Amino acid sequence: MAEKTPTQLIDSFDRRIEYVRLSVTDRCDFRCTYCMAEEMTFLPRSKVLSLEEIARIAGVFVQLGVAKLRVTGGEPLVRRDVTTLFQQLGALLDNKGLKELAVTTNGSQLVRFAPALRAAGVSTLNISLDTLNPDRFRALTRTGTLAQVIAGIDAALEQNFPRIRLNAVVLRGNNEDDVLPLLDFALNRGLDIAFIEEMPLGQVNMAGKPLEFLPSDTILSGVEQHYNLESEGAPDHSGPARYWRVDGSSTRMGLISPHSNNFCGSCNRLRVTAEGQLLLCLGNEHSISLRDLLRDGASDIELSNAIVTALNDKPKQHVFDQPDQPQIMRFMNASGG
Ligand code: SAM
Ligand code: SF4
């Protein structure tokens, strides 16, 4: 009898997985201080999934009921020929079962790529922007130019993506005074914005460097002194952010709080790294190599079965705030955030 493909992904804590983030490269044109070290050794190309391998894995996930794919990195838009991948992923939309194709980008290449992303069917863009001060932007990203990113945001706006959200990691004593200017920037352009607590990943947080995250509640009370906010809670299946609508505007402010508001109970996500590791949790080491399976000639059904079996090991929650647990040694650019 022919083997049947499983049609949905439910883990041992009854969480249904509908959202997969695909990291398509570990490389990046920036070196953000909270994400990478100044000197990075990137993966040899032979270890990185080819665009065809990524598209095949994506197709298997969509057959398993995944409705949302997010392409991330490193910086996804520095991967050569990435537009062809977007076209292949776009072909999974609608009648193939995919409902939403999303990208997270640092914005540096958007002037060039925004039209192609929109044409391929990308509906949701997250663009990282931590400050509106050009010198601080250069210091935080080590190599980035603020004007180039703002031009990228405006190029994306011209394409009328249904959803664009800015992402800002807020670091105590660094860019906390950017929160209100960034919110004003989002309001002026009719964009959403999420403020993110820094997470401890990779050796950027080694050598005794204390985490500089600013608790989301501090951000919330600061913003509430200037704006009326209406809580919208955490929309189902969209990600870990809790949202507030800024009164009288279309802008929603999101808070992503891995430390102060554990969101693991409603986690509906898996991640695939640039080298094809299926990560069951951003904040744990559990993983299996989809690349090895693919390169050993696994069929789609064998890949599906391996994913379903791996899901039994999806942990209940991350270990970021448990001092007795080993912290995660992956850099954020490896897993895509
Ligand atoms: N290069 C793209 C970008 O910056 O948007 C995509 C990859 S980046 C790893 C994805 C998101 O993770 C970005 O919004 C970035 O700000 C965030 N990020 C990186 N390192 C982080 C950390 N240590 N804690 C919290 N967020 C982090
Ligand atoms: Fe690159 Fe994004 Fe990491 Fe910054 S956060 S170094 S832009 S991957």
Image: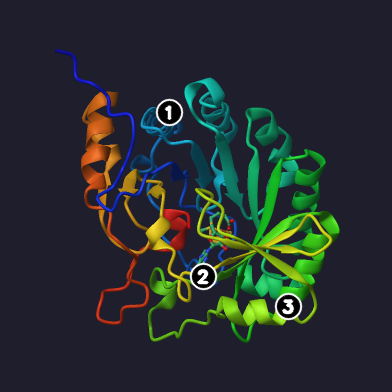
Res. 178 in view: no
- Label 3 vs label 2: CA separation? 17 Å
- Label 3 vs label 1: CA separation? 47 Å
Whether residue 233 sits left or right of residue 308 in the image: it is: right
**Closer to the camera, 245 or 306?**
245
Q: Earlier in the sequence, mark 3 or mark 1?
A: 1
> Is 279 drawn above or below residue 116 in the view shown?
below
Report the number of discs: 3
Whether residue 90 sits left or right of residue 164 in the image: it is: left
Q: Secondary structure at mark 1?
A: helix
User: Of the residues shown, which amino acid type is indicated by label 2?
Assistant: Ser
User: Of the residues shown, which amino acid type is indicated by label 3?
Assistant: Glu
* Category of crowding for the residue at label 1, using alpha-carbon neighbours closer than 10 angstroms: few (below 14), some (14–19), many (at least 20): few
> Is 235 drawn above or below residue 55 in the view shown?
below
Q: Which mark is residue 257?
A: 2
Q: Quadrant of ligand 2?
A: bottom right
Whether residue 198 sits left or right of residue 166 in the image: it is: left
| Mark 3 residue CB less than 8 A from any atom of ligand 1 | no
> Is 52 drawn above or below residue 270 in the view shown?
above
* Residue at the image point whose x is 53% and y is 79% from the top: 213
* Category of crowding for the residue at label 3, using alpha-carbon neighbours closer than 10 angstroms: few (below 14), some (14–19), many (at least 20): few
Whether residue 62 sits left or right of residue 215 in the image: it is: left
**Closer to the camera, 244 or 61?**
244
The residue indicated by pointer 3 is 224
Res. 65 in view: yes
Residue 322, position as x, y percentages in the image: 31, 78
Q: Secondary structure at mark 3?
A: helix
The residue indicated by pointer 1 is 52
Question: Which quarter of the figure has residue 265?
Answer: bottom left
> Is 58 drawn above or below residue 219 in the view shown?
above
